[in-house]
């Protein structure tokens, strides 16, 4: 296997929302990039299903679906001539305990409204949460490192129980998380989308359209390596770089199973060597994924503190579910209505009749695709009992069309770690050994926030290095 060298300004590891957006912004500024993406396309958690028979090729998003109506979204979609339309999330919601079949009695609307007002007032006291974690004050306020369940009690936010158990279901055990993470996820922009501005979607109802447009533009002058993995990274410090006779470069060896035209490479993989001035790691920063960078103990000590829940999405063909209704799993015997996991978190309608979007969560371990399927079938059985009042209901057996693993979904650390300066130390790694970091871990999983924090990392850290 021969190595062919590729010289670029930035090598980006990971072509999800963060990596794709970083490439787009660097391309705008006339910098060269190479993206190394283990999947077949850009977009990460943005996944879209089409079937010529079941849906007549109509797109159905089963990852990212609705977007906050923010300037970064409007500007980027406008650049790529992808039209947006406003969208309302006004479905009926049926909350019940899937295990027990018992409904959850909604809290009075006035209690929820009053609690949201109190929460908004509290959130306004922490404007530095708008983008990323870099601007956290030192020391971090006690409220932000305390478990959110304590803050709910302290500020009389019990009226948020129904709303937050729905909005935060994919985060795992959110009542026990440091309040910092809840306020990042349900931040000012997110609340505005929910309560005032509404949401937007591509007119095509295909969230992947934006990443196909990015890919088409980038492919003309940049290097996109799909179905590829980094096998070795050298020269992340000046001494090693000098020894490698590449004092201003990080050296990244990549193995690909397809070439740049997406044709399979047989009978073996192709090896590429990328020499880059900077390295941008835009994939989830879990220690096993980062080891290829040759982490030192300083880096390893930080990254191994992260913990995460597991989240899966799927599309299921099933007849007999109620139209325009979210069916949500809430644990009736849990003080915060958390269902017993692993299990279905919710069934949600799509634009195609008889096809529903499913989310499955686990907080104890990762699930195989077969186990996700078992959770879905058990969830459908729960809906049958709910619809039929114990008599079986009219829902058909589910046909699972597609399953996507979105794990790790949210990487968090303990409140004690946050109080001890975890994010200050993490920010200090930006540029250390010519490596920079971005992605949902550095803000939230909402796409506009991922894009905004990526722009922040570029402007504050990576671009000054390239200009220097």
Image (tube, helix red, strand yellow):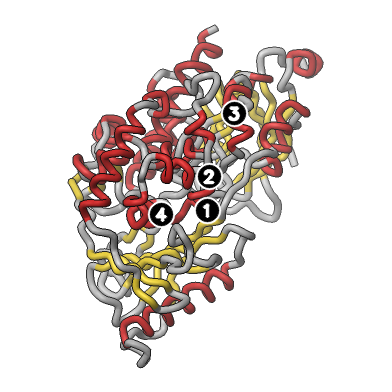
Residue 296, numbered circle: none
**Front-most of residues 358 and 152:** 152
Q: Can residue 35 be seen?
A: yes
Cβ atoms at labels 3 and 1 below 8 Å apart: no
Distance from Cα at disc 4 to Cα at disc 2: 24 Å
Distance from Cα at disc 2 to Cα at disc 1: 7 Å
Name the residue at 42% across, 45% down.
153
Cβ atoms at labels 4 and 3 below 8 Å apart: no
Q: Is residue 328 above or below residue 110?
A: below
**Front-most of residues 275 and 156:** 156
Distance from Cα at disc 3 to Cα at disc 1: 20 Å
Reading the image, the residue beneath label 4 is: 63
Cβ atoms at labels 2 and 3 below 8 Å apart: no
Would you identify the image quadrant in which residue 368 lies?
Answer: bottom right
Residue 173, numbered circle: 1
Q: Residues within 10 Å of mark 4 (few under 14, many from 20)?
A: many
Name the residue at 35% across, 81% down.
386
**Front-most of residues 374 and 141:** 141
Element at label 4:
loop
Would you identify the image quadrant in which residue 72 lies?
Answer: top left
Reading the image, the residue beneath label 2 is: 177
Q: Residues within 10 Å of mark 3 (few under 14, many from 20)?
A: some
Location of residue 384 in the rendering, given as x and y in whole percent from the top left corner: 37, 83
Location of residue 255 in the rendering, given as x and y in whole percent from the top left corner: 67, 43
Reading the image, the residue beneath label 3 is: 419
Location of residue 170 in the rendering, given as x and y in whole percent from the top left corner: 46, 54
Q: Name the N-terminal-most of marks 3 and 1.
A: 1
Q: Name the N-terminal-most of marks 2 and 3.
A: 2
Cβ atoms at labels 2 and 1 below 8 Å apart: yes
Distance from Cα at disc 2 to Cα at disc 3: 13 Å
As drawn, the residue found furthest toward the bottom would be: 391
């Amino acid at each position: 296997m021969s190595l062919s060298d590729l010289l670029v300004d930035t090598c980006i590891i990971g072509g999800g929302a963060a990596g794709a957006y970083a490439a787009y912004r660097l391309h705008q500024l006339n910098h060269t990039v190479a993206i190394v993406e283990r999947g077949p396309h850009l977009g990460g958690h943005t996944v879209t299903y089409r079937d010529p028979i079941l849906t007549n090729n109509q797109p159905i998003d089963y990852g990212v679906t609705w977007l906050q109506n923010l300037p970064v979204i409007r500007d980027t979609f406008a650049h790529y001539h992808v039209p947006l339309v406003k969208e309302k999330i006004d479905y009926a919601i049926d909350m019940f305990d899937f295990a027990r079949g018992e409904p959850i009695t909604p809290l009075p609307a006035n209690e929820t409204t009053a609690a949201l007002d109190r929460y908004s007032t509290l959130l306004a006291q922490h404007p530095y949460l708008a983008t990323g974690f870099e601007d956290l004050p030192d020391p971090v306020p006690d409220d932000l490192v305390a478990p959110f369940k304590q803050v709910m009690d302290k500020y009389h936010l019990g009226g948020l129980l129904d709303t937050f158990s729905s909005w935060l279901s994919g985060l795992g055990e959110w009542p026990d998380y440091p309040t910092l993470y809840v306020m990042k996820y349900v931040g000012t922009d997110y609340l505005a989308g929910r309560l005032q501005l509404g949401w937007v979607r591509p007119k095509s109802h295909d969230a992947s359209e934006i990443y196909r447009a990015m890919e088409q533009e980038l492919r003309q002058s940049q290097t996109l390596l799909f179905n590829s993995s980094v096998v070795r990274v050298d020269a992340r410090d000046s001494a090693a770089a000098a020894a490698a006779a590449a004092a201003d470069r990080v050296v990244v060896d990549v193995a690909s199973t397809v070439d740049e035209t997406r044709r399979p490479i047989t009978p073996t993989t192709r090896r590429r060597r990328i020499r880059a001035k900077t390295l941008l790691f835009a994939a989830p920063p879990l220690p096993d994924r980062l080891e290829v960078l040759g982490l030192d103990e300083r880096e390893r000590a930080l990254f191994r503190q992260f913990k995460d829940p597991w989240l899966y999405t799927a599309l299921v063909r099933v007849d007999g579910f109620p139209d325009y209704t979210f069916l949500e799993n809430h644990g009736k015997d849990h003080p915060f209505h958390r269902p017993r996991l692993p299990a279905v978190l919710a069934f949600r309608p799509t634009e195609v009749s008889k096809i529903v979007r499913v989310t499955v969560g686990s907080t104890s371990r990762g699930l195989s695709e077969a186990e996700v399927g078992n959770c879905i079938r058990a969830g459908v059985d729960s809906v049958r009992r709910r619809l039929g009042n114990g008599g079986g209901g009219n829902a058909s057996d589910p046909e699972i069309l597609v399953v996507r693993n979105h794990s790790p979904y949210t990487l968090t650390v303990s409140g004690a770690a946050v109080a001890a300066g975890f994010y200050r130390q993490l920010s200090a790694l930006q540029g250390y050994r010519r490596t920079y970091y971005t992605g949902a871990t550095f803000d939230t999983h909402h796409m506009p926030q991922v894009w905004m924090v990526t722009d922040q990392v570029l402007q504050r850290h990576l671009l000054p290095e390239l200009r220097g």
